Amino acid sequence: MLTFAALALSSLFSHVQAHYTFPSLIVNGVTTPAWTNVRQTNNFNSQDPVTDVTSADFRCYDSATAGTASTITVAAGSTLGIACDQTIYHPGVVNVYMAKAPTGNVSTFAGDGAVWFKVYQITATTNGGSSISFPAQNLPSVSFTIPKSLPTGQYLVRMEALALHLAETFQGAQWYISCGQISVTGGGSGTPGPLVSIPGVYTGNEPGILINIYYPIPATYTQPGPAVWTG
Ligand SMILES: *[C@@H]1O[C@H](CO)[C@@H](O)[C@H](O)[C@H]1NC(C)=O
Ligand SMILES: [Cu+2]
């Protein structure tokens, strides 16, 4: 009885440990307080993932919180980080998308339409079927350069950590998502693209989303989504 309770408790604990959120940005090396510059997500307590890539919550996961945030200034050409509340526990990959607020005020920007471009990704490493590894796994944060040629303006920055440990069935893949708000200064005259809609960018049947990462070991891995725009 005691043993069973201890086991149940420990499995509950590891389940909680297994989920995560991305509540902070890292700007000029400083991690912002949780849910200050990132819209609070529905799972801020549960840490539960999104599994339906067609749901409205696949964008910023804030239907229940009506997430609001304040906007932080980031210079074009500088490094922007996105911090996890713990580490990226599960094996999987990362995509970061951005979308420019057409009105100039990202606080009132929902991110509708084909407005999103990919600025960063961390894919899987394969070698023809003998092993697969996930460089994003266990990272406490990710960081990337805001392209110098990105036009000045306000943007949503959407973090997407795709966990693949249960991805062998449709909607088994788990998505840990959040949207930050940044004001990019000193930008250029680049034209970001390709542009995609979110939701809409994935069907859930992509080879990098519906995949058994354990057996047989995938010979290759196809990162979901468009190419990264580097400016
Ligand atoms: C942007 O929109 C928010 C929410 O409506 C508002 O509080 C804020 O004052 C606006 N900012 C500017 C610069 O207009
Ligand atoms: Cu988990």
Image (spheres, rainbow, N blue to C red):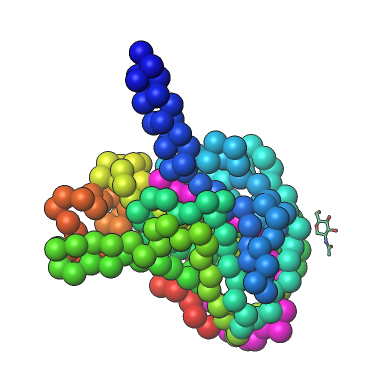
The residue stretch that appears in magenta: 174-192
169 or 130, which is in the foreground? 130
41 or 187, which is in the foreground? 41
Q: Position of residue 218 (x, y in %)?
A: 19, 59
The reply, left or right, for residue 83 in relation to residue 118 is right
Majority secondary structure of the magenta segment? strand
The mark tally for this picture is 0
State whether residue 142 appears in this view.
yes
Q: Is residue 3 above or below residue 155?
A: above
Q: Position of residue 169 (x, y in %)?
A: 27, 41
Instruction: Look at 45% across and 34% down and name the residue there.
Output: 13
Tell whether position 132 is magenta.
Answer: no
Instruction: Look at 31% across and 64% down and name the residue there.
Output: 124
Instruction: Look at 73% across and 66% down and name the residue there.
Output: 72
Q: Position of residue 41 (x, y in %)?
A: 61, 45
64 or 202, which is in the foreground? 64
State whether residue 158 appears in this view.
no
